[in-house]
Amino acid sequence: MKLEKLSEVVIKEKLLENPNWKLIDERWIERKYRFQDYLKGIEFVQSVAQLSEQLNHHPFISIDYKLITVKITSWRAKGLTDLDFTLAQKYDELYAQIKEKDC
């Protein structure tokens, strides 16, 4: 799959559709996910890692106790692509599923 770098206008539109994600340095999107306990965060990281491996598109993941930070970009495109935003939505779905189990 050829990854096309998105224009600033398209990136802004996609950020409106994904309001929990922030643009960082004009080439990354980032979101912080908070969990009730450490192991729920680790479960989320494992889910993100498995999905990312399947799609061969890997984010930067930072684990700070109950706070998980995910950053995505497309190196080959030298910026953000549709795939980055697709993954952002899928990561949000994984988060919602794990949070749902807590209720």
Image (cartoon, grey):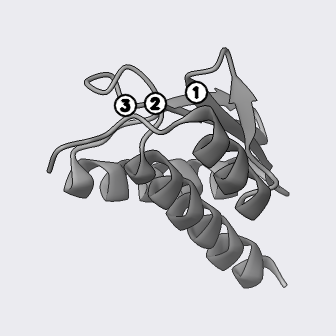
**Circles 2, 3 touching at the beta carbon (< 8 Å):** yes
Crowd rating for badge 2 (residues with CA inside 10 Å; few <14, some 14–19, many 20+): many
Which amino acid type is shown beneath numbered disc 2?
A: Thr
Q: Quadrant of residue 2?
A: top left
Q: Residue at x 60, y 47 (%)?
A: 10
- Which of the pair 10/30 is nearer the observer? 10
**Distance of mark 3 from mark 1, alpha carbons?**
8 Å
Q: Is residue 22 above or below residue 91?
A: above
Give the numbered dot on residue 12.
none
- Callout 3 environment at 10 Å: few (<14), some (14 to 19), or many (20+)? many
Identify the residue position indicated by label 1 in the image.
28
Q: Residue furthest left?
A: 1
Distance from disc 2 to disc 1, alpha carbons, whole Å, reads 5 Å
What is the three-letter code of the residue carrying label 1?
Trp
Classify residue 19 as left or right of residue 83.
right
Q: Looking at the rendered structure, which numbered label has been put on residue 74? A: 3
Q: Dot 1: few (<14), some (14–19), or many (≥20) neighbours within 10 Å?
A: some
Q: What is the total number of numbered labels drawn onto the structure image?
A: 3
In the displayed structure image, the side of residue 79 where residue 22 appears, left or right: right
Mark 3 residue element = loop
Who's the residue at 37% across and 19% down the image? 78
Residue 37 is situated, as x and y percent measured from the top left of the image, at: 79, 53
Residue ID for mark 2: 73
Q: Earlier in the sequence, mark 2 or mark 1?
A: 1
The kind of residue tagged 3 is Ser
- Residue drawn at 72 percent across, 41 percent down: 31
The quadrant of the picture occupied by the C terminus is bottom right
Pointer 2 with pointer 1, Cβ within 8 A? yes
Question: Residue, x 26% and y 41% (percent of image)?
Answer: 3
Q: Considering only order in the chain, which callout, 1 or 3, is on the residue closer to the N terminus?
A: 1
